[in-house]
Image (tube, rainbow, N blue to C red):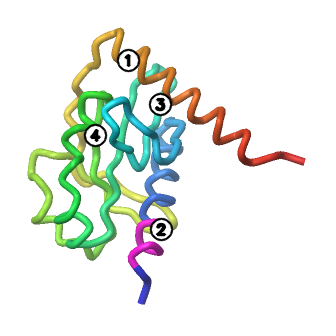
Amino acid sequence: METRPEVTEAVTRGTARLLVDMGYAPIFELSLPNGRRADIAAVSKKGEILMVEVKSCRADFEVDKKWPEYREYCDLFYFAVPEDFPVELLPEDEALIIADGFGGAIVRPSEKITLAGARRKQTLIRIARSAAFKGLATPRV
């Protein structure tokens, strides 16, 4: 049986693979100006911003109610969960991805809410800087 961190890692990896297949460039653990941290943030070729909150189990969802605060920084928002997650816990009006370590599938699409230009610019710069700094932490030989 997988541990909670192993499930989280697998769902995150599979969701990132799905996003790449959809044309998005994902990064992990993006700090937001409101002090929150999005598990996955991704940018499309058009500059559309998508964020994902990964939940591994019931307890993970029940103790963390900060996810509504991510919505003001993205055009699209999803929950990503493993196949055995009790999806009835999730709000019915929020988008849903089911994923494992190999990939994922969108079960409920996200309602697109277009960000204001200034907020989009601020968030895109934050994503770019975060990706650049993470790249520095991984030296290439």
Which dot marks residue 43? 3
Q: Check the image and name the residue furthest to the top.
A: 117
Q: What amino acid type should be assigned to the residue bearing mark 3? A: Val
Question: Do callouts 1 and 4 mark residues in contact (Cβ within 8 Å)?
Answer: no
Q: What amino acid type should be assigned to the residue bearing mark 4? A: Phe
**How far is the residue under mark 4 from the one under mark 3?**
12 Å
Q: Measured along the vertical axis of the image, is residue 2 above or below residue 89?
A: below
Which dot marks residue 10? 2
Nearest the eye: 137 or 28: 137
Q: Quadrant of residue 129?
A: top right
Nearest the eye: 10 or 104: 10
The residue at which mark 4 appears reads as 77
Q: Earlier in the sequence, mark 3 or mark 1?
A: 3
> Crowding near pointer 3: few (<14 within 10 Å), some, many (20+)?
many
**How far is the residue under mark 4 from the one under mark 2?**
19 Å
Q: Position of residue 70 (x, y in %)?
A: 28, 37
Q: Earlier in the sequence, mark 4 or mark 3?
A: 3
Nearest the eye: 74 or 102: 74
**Which residues are the magenta region?**
4-10
The residue at which mark 1 appears reads as 120
Q: Position of residue 54 (x, y in %)?
A: 34, 57
What kind of secondary structure does the magenta stretch mostly adopt? helix
**How far is the residue under mark 3 from the one under mark 2?**
21 Å
Question: Do callouts 4 and 2 mark residues in contact (Cβ within 8 Å)?
Answer: no
Q: Measured along the vertical axis of the image, is residue 23 above or below residue 4?
A: above
**Left-right relation of 64 to 31:** left
Q: Check the image and name the residue furthest to the bottom.
A: 1
Which dot marks residue 31? none
Q: What amino acid type should be assigned to the residue bearing mark 1? A: Arg
